[in-house]
Amino acid sequence: MIYFTDGTKESFLTAFLAAYSDDEAYITSSQAQLALGQKSVFVGANPARAARAEQRLLSFDKDCIEELTMLLRSGEPEREQLAFGYLKFLSEERRPVRGMLAKSEVLAAQECLARVTREIHRLHGFVRFLECESGALYAPIVPKADICDLLVPHFQKRLQGIPFVLHDVPRKKAAVCDGKRCFAAPLEQAQIVLSASETQWQQLWRKYYQSVNLPSREKLKQIRGNMPVRYWRVLTELH
Amino acid sequence: MIDAKRLQILTEAARFDVSCSSSGSARKNAGGMGNGYAAGLCHSFTPDGRCVSLLKILMSNDCVFACKYCMNRCDLDVPRASATPEEIAELTTDFYKRNYIEGLFLSSAIVKSPNYTMELLLRTVKLLRQTYRFFGYIHVKGIPYADDGLVEEAARYADRMSFNIELPSEKSLKLLAPQKSKEGLLVPMRTLEKKREIFREERPKELFLPAGQTTQLIVGATPETDGAIVRLSERLYRGAKLKRVYYSSYLPMVHDSLLPDRPAGQLREHRLYQADWLLRFYGFTADEIAPEGENLPLDIDPKCAWALRNLQYFPVEVNRAPLELLLRVPGVGGRSADKILKAQRYTRLTFDDLKKMRVVLKRARHFLTADGKYYGAKDLQTVRGLLAVAEQSGTCEQLSLFDHATAYSALTGEF
């Protein structure tokens, strides 16, 4: 049986309870086409059932719900199934299992979590702010995982008082910080007016990027590994 | 705003300083812009594969010294430029605000005199911290022969400082950098480290070089062996308490009869960094890594070379081995060792488990048993040959134990 969720944590936890005893269960939120003969059911969020599942899981491992949230943010097509395998194994063992790396369900979940954490770390570096006429900063980002709001505390600490917007372009949403408060908002397309000196600073940055390179030691494969191509479109120095 | 021409001259001249790290400082934002990121952060990567973390720039490339290897030496006819402290501070804060950089790496040629230059650097750092209220990472180059007072004051504002030794022996320094001496470089390092310890004991709340000191050595411009270089690094780490020693393989930018015409290979630099990691994170001593008068082998990495010289310690059973022994197995790094230790608490690990956990077995299989089973080659010559082949293949492809042909050859040692 395929259990379709609406992508939220509550819907997933409701589906988790429904699918727990089903050996053929497959939980997903993607709208992929079904193969012939496959049975499916849509499981909407049931707050009471979700809370019950959450309490039960927390009694086995106090950090597992935070891990679940990160897994669901990963943006990977198999994320719900991966979380299902991990949490089902946790429920069977009734103790924290994240160290049991020889178990494929645990390893898959831990590797997915590491990918999300790594992307957060990378994006702390790969965000490029544009200065607007008002002095506010705007940065378009193209993350694989849904982590826009998780980047905010890092920039809030270092840009004290400066308003900024992190715009997750593919997901059409933004994390906005007005200098004091932060909130999330849907944002399809941003209309910004750049400050008078913005283009000059961008040109200086490009000049700097070219100057520090040693052309006789080109290693393009290495640069793609360290700085995946999907981020290049927002990196000022590469345009 | 600094103009593009001067920016190009001052940053091209600074790119041979290989230090790019922004780690080690968790400086807090005290009501301005910026803070430290203890783990360090890369903001970009240049096509030569190096990370861009800091704005690496010279105050000036107009030098009064004549170090033979340096492209800024006074007797060369190259374009000269200087920047003011205000220009550097403005550039740093505007780059930082746009998240281009993690901080500033400020160096300089010796302008007029060491004290004059150190004063310029100090003024810039103070301007950034006090006027611009910048709390991001700052790495300041120490100027040899500058007054201790100036160096110490700069250290109170910087996160990290470095005096570049550049040439690994006194003899080479005399030959290629006659205005510098070993003591002239090592004494200020030791003095700063002592001050740092005093600060930590007496004023633990105040920051004094939270990210410590580093240095840089040029490799291949002079005849020192890798064994001698690794010993020097060991003394710097354990004696002078340096945080990092960087190695820069020699690239001929200026011609001089005392310097080689060809660049030193990057592979040698890579092997030295591997040896450096063994010193810092794997519990090795310089004596174990390379004899004093010898270079590191280029065909295999230093840990493999050590393991082949010390086969009496192998094979190691993964299910019983403690961390320090696992870390000595070629191919097993800190991350793999950590995964093995976590997993062995719950189950008896087999080779299949290690493979699933993405422990790279290409080299390790010759030095490990898992659940009592050994899949490596049987004699030393074959192991050495296979390790060299594995190294040349350049990829970290996992050996398949379940592909019939490979499994057979792993068992028989025939290829």
Image (spheres, coloured by chain):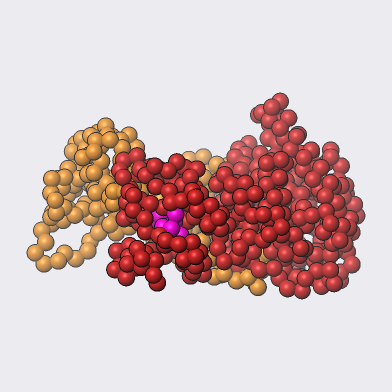
Chain colours: A orange, B red
Of the pair A14 and B72, the residue shown nearer to us: B72
Q: Residue drawn at (75%, 70%), measured in percent from left and top?
A: B252
Is A145 on the left-hand or right-hand side of B198? Answer: left
Residue A149 visible from this viewpoint: no
Q: Is residue B8 magenta?
A: no
Expressed as whole percent of the image width and height from the top left, the position of residue B219 reads 71, 61
Of the pair A221 and B316, the residue shown nearer to us: B316
Specify the quadrant that holds the C terminus of chain B.
bottom left
Magenta segment boundaries in residue numbering: B358-367
Expressed as whole percent of the image width and height from the top left, the position of residue A163 reads 54, 47
Vertical placement of B152 versus B67: above or below?
A: above
Q: Residue drawn at (78%, 48%), measured in percent from left and top?
A: B142
Is B144 on the left-hand or right-hand side of B289? Answer: right
Number of numbered discs: 0
Specify the quadrant that holds the N terminus of chain B.
bottom right
Is B235 on the left-hand or right-hand side of B100? Answer: right
Q: Is residue B362 magenta?
A: yes
Magenta stretch prevailing secondary structure? loop
Expressed as whole percent of the image width and height from the top left, the position of residue A146 reads 38, 53
